[in-house]
Image (cartoon, rainbow, N blue to C red):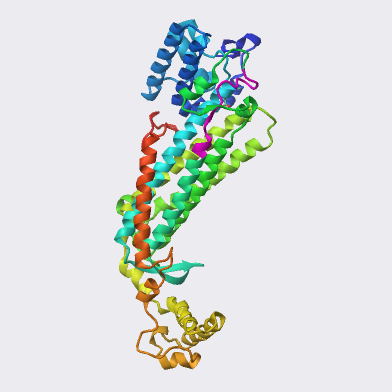
Amino acid sequence: MGSRDKPWGGRFSEATDPTVERFSASVHFDRALARYDIRGSIAHARMLARAGLIEPAEADALCEGLLAIGEDIEAGRFEFDPALEDIHMNVETRLRERIGPVAGRLHTGRSRNDQVATDTALYLRDAARAARRGLALLQQVLVERGREHVDTVLPGYTHLQRAQPVRLAHHWLAFVSMFERDAQRFRDLDRRLVHCPLGSGAIAGSTLPLDRTDTARALEFEGPSANSMDSVASRDGALEMLSATAICMVHLSRLAEELVLWSSAEFGFVELADAYSTGSSLMPQKKNPDVPELVRGKSGRAIGNLVTLLTIVKGLPLTYNRDLQEDKEPLFDSVTTLRDCLEVLAGSLATLRVQEERMALAARDPMLLATDLAETLVREGVPFREAHEAVGRIVGHCVEKDLDLGALSREDLRAFHEAFPAGADELLSLERALEERSLPGGTAKVRVLEALEAASARLEDEIEAIEELGALDSLPALRPGEPQGGSA
Ligand code: ARG
């Protein structure tokens, strides 16, 4: 099909060059917007009838045709034609084939510019809710596994050097906190998607008496957008999605990195289930953590996608420019990547074997209690800097003489600082090191149990809130080859 057969063909006397047709087509990816495009068109058609711009019977015909096309698309029966450029024209052209010339009334007072902005806002809303849902399910796994491992102790690390002992539940709750903030970012961006672009037309609105409030309400927006030029020019909703996704992917990547590290022979802290590992084609002994490695690797795409769209938008004069069509692939890619990463990480963690003994062995390193020794002196009235210095000398002595810090007697310690209290109590105790860290946010058992309870209560509320919003289990298919209905 050349330009002359296209909906705008009147002005053209030559057909589009086939290379240009291929170059500018977007339907191979923007078909992911199909269900939103149909929904938007139905709302628009109904409004046109209510505003007296088309007959009610015409609106009925338009809506019936659109619904049938939507069913065909979801069922994978729709033949997309790249010569028709994008999803909008594919749907409209099919509608004309189906219901005849009345289809020509659908685009009354509408441009693909406000149409695509509306479709994208509707898509972002579902994507934000799906991300929250995936995050809540992952957090639930972390909380459940945390409950099993309140008494599993491992070294906490700074600089990847053993620092202080912590409960494994406490360690995983750190990620729960990160994911909770990630979910809030998705909720926040969803809350900003409340203004409907429809009725903005190509740039300046319409001379026709459209009812913008009607379409906005029908599509569950609070109301029409405030400025028609902003509506067709802006992509900050997509940018927020890419940004929230990039941050979240970075958190997932850090969790994934620990699974990689911990499943190495050097750590030996965890073993991934067979179902979440792969073998080597060459080395028969290998069991590789490909799943977390891929999550770590895919965070790169999410970061890249954010940079891509920022770069696309930054130099554009108002309002719509075709560059903006380039928003979709990075957006769809990030949303799908996040969905998949959340799912495989939740599965990996749910089936992970924890090698408690290996963790305990590492946590029994008495050097992890050096801070506690210094704090013992502080309790005896010694300034912290002085205490730190004294314990530093003790540690240096142990390293030099190859001694176990835990084997030093009270007298040995008092030789370094006389304020070490006399008495029978063990100065170095792993149990006390954990239990005395009972400030809010600490690793003492009571705090960790409280934190698990609180997190699980918040997660229940979150899941209820998402269900109320009617969050989708599945997003529309975004990758070539995926069924259009999407897979959960
Ligand atoms: N496929 C286009 C996009 O995604 C739809 C809007 C086209 N508008 C236009 N004036 N060519 O940006």
Give the mark count.
0
Q: Give residue 70's quadrant in the image.
A: top left
Main SS of residues in magenta: loop
Asked if residue 263 shows in the view, the reply is no
Boundaries of the magenta span:
189-205
Residue 321 or residue 146, whichever sits in front = 146
Ligand 1 occupies quarter: top right
Residue 214 position in % (x across, y down): 50, 20
Residue 212 or residue 392, whichever sits in front = 212
Q: In this view, does 418 lie above or below 125?
A: below
Task: Tell whether position 43 is magenta.
Answer: no
Task: Tell whether position 199 is magenta.
Answer: yes
Q: In this view, does 466 lie to the left or right of 419?
A: left
Q: In what quadrant of the picture does the N terminus appear?
A: top right
Q: In this view, does 397 lie above or below 230?
A: below
Q: In this view, does 367 lie above or below 134?
A: below
Residue 487 position in % (x across, y down): 36, 35
Asked if residue 221 shows in the view, the reply is yes
Residue 63 position in % (x across, y down): 43, 14
